[in-house]
Image: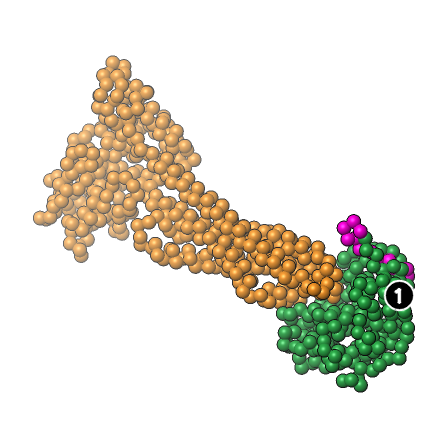
Chain colours: A orange, B green
Amino acid sequence: MRFLFDGNTWQEIFGSIGKNRTRTIITVIGVLWGILIYIVLSGAAKGLDNGFEKQFQNVAMNSMFTWAQSTSMPYKGFKTGRQLQLKLSDGVLLKNRIPEIQYIAPRNVKGIFGGSPAQIIRSGKSGNYAVYGDYPISTKIATKKIYDGGRFINDEDIDGARKVCVIGERTQKELFENDENPIGGYIRIDNVFFQVVGVHKFTPGGGFESDSDIYIPFTTFKKLYNTGENVGWFAIAAYDDADVIKVEENVKAVLKNIHNVNPKDERAIGSFNLGEIFNRIVGFAKGLTFMSLVVGIATILAGVIGIGNILLISVKERTKELGVRRALGATPREVRSLIILESVFLTMLAGIMGIILGAGVLSLINKLTQGMDFPYANPTVPIPYVLGALVIMVVLGTLIGLIPAQRAVSIKPIDALREE
Amino acid sequence: MIEIKDLHKSYKMGSNSLHVLKGINFSVEEGELVAIMGSSGSGKSTLLNILGMLDVLDEGSYTLDGVPIKDLNETKAAQYRNKFLGFVFQSFNLINYKSAMENVALPLYYQKVGRKERQEKALKYLEQVGLREWADHLPSELSGGQKQRVAIARAMAAEPKVLLADEPTGALDSTTSYEVMDLIQKINDAGNTILIVTHEPDIADMCKRIVHLKDGVIVEDKKITQVRASQYV
């Protein structure tokens, strides 16, 4: 170990590395390229991973939606093709029977699944927008960003069936003047006046919602459109540790049970599982990370083998020099350490340069993709990956250095010094 | 200083073995300047290699400065070489990417001498061979005679017991050869023991003793009156 911290040792190493600059540079580029690819690939994979996560950040990852369709099997005396209707009470039952459910939000909409959108009028301006009937709990499943000064529907709105609404960014632009504060303003939804209490910021996250949606309290919706206890669909979020696919099955089984549907009927209850989709994407990102690891390490390996190869040639070239060193009193150990340290030093030098360059490339990619509609954000390489790569390089550099080092030691000084 | 008794050495060449040294008895006192002569194949280089611990003997004994040289592994041999011996080669064998001073300092590096002291000593020995101003030059910037003088300075830097020179003038013209011999004689005058392998009679005449080898045995071993090289310089 003392050997490692001896300035003289390093002087010897720099001397022999500096002797053949071109060769040293080309060798270093080999490993540098390897670590660069490793860093860029794993950083990019992480960036994609982050990008996907960002796209889904507004939606509970383990959430699902379920709605009623028509039966495809006769059951308990009911004929096939019966149209089913979800009821508010179904939600209570679901929550009671399935402990994995964290939040359940009944929702209704006018203007998306058949039916014409509501007509919205405000002082001479008008438009047609989809109107949702919502509970406050909805935001626990899919976050709604509300602009400053506004709010989402709250429990009091529900209890009093207040005529309040949350409008979309586009609705605001189309119904209000630029300098006008929409909060507190009134709009007419299908001829009923509603007070605007908030403007929601639209975040794309899959699904059918848009930047023009209007949210009103579920109870108000019920009165406005005479939907009674009917529910369009349930948005359900399971606990983080729950298996969403299992929950999805349970939910459908319970609903079939309530509505007297054959348990084998695949059509009667529809559902969409965000968790499953998300898991697939996460799996894809993980696969990508793994692949980048494999490719990166393979490239590093190729580079390090290149170093070994070059050092082997270098040892052959330096046969005489090594012979002289031996004649002057260098022990085999000292010769071996010299070659191994050269190998490790070159690998480390290349590695550190590669990491710095890789970070540069990553930040460049980040800059270029900024503002593009591309799931890519904050590409970073976890520190353990970087350290791991360095450790791998030192180990590989040592191992690969052993080959030329052994070759150097195996040459007898007398053979090395023999006159041509 | 050097004591060799009944030395045998043979090389395996396929199924045959080549008996190169066939019982050499030979001793060198401190301060001697010995020329080992012989035609090629006489075994003179083999003898020098064994003396230099670059090769091992088959039979017989070798004692250097009272230390029996036997059963050497590479590490031990390296340490003994470093401590006891200085080498001068026909083709100089300087390390081409090191300056003259660094070359001279190299054996001291292997003696674990500190950097500053190493440089001081190296400069001192370069001074002795008259190349102080050339300390920062690479071997490629030096003439043949200068290179050999640097090599001699390097051999002396470790302050060895014995200086072994293998055809030190073999690659030099006669004027330069005499300059180098003049230097070697001066080093010998200072009390150092030197062995020179050569096949040039005029170089041998500048030593104090000539040992003739032929077919692996010493055929002649005589003390001579030294011809001073300085008269030719």
- Reply above or below: A248 against A180: above
Name the residue located 23 percent from the left edge and 46 percent from the top edge: A211
Identify the subunit bearing mark 1: B
In which image quadrant can residue A180 be found? bottom left
What secondary structure prevails in the magenta region? strand
Q: Dividing the image into 4 quarters, which one contains the N terminus of chain B?
A: bottom right
Q: Is residue B7 magenta?
A: yes
Q: Position of residue B14 (x, y in %)?
A: 76, 50
- Please provide percent x and percent y for residue B7: 88, 59
Q: Which residues are magenta?
A: B2-16
| Element carrying mark 1 | strand
Q: Would residue B221 be counted in the magenta stretch?
A: no
Residue appearing at x 22%, y 41% in the figure: A215
Query: Quarter of the image holding residue B58?
Result: bottom right
Residue A29 in view (yes/no) = yes
Residue B161 appears in the rendering: no
Residue type indicated by callout 1: Ile
Mark 1 is surrounded, within 10 Å at the Cα level, by few (under 14), some (14 to 19) or many (20 or more) other residues, namely many
- The correct choice, above or below, for B139 with respect to B12 in the image is below
Between B212 and A58, which is closer to the camera in this rendering? B212
Q: Quadrant of the C terminus of chain B?
A: bottom right
Residue identifier under label 1: B218
**At x 37% / y 39%, what residue is drawn?**
A278
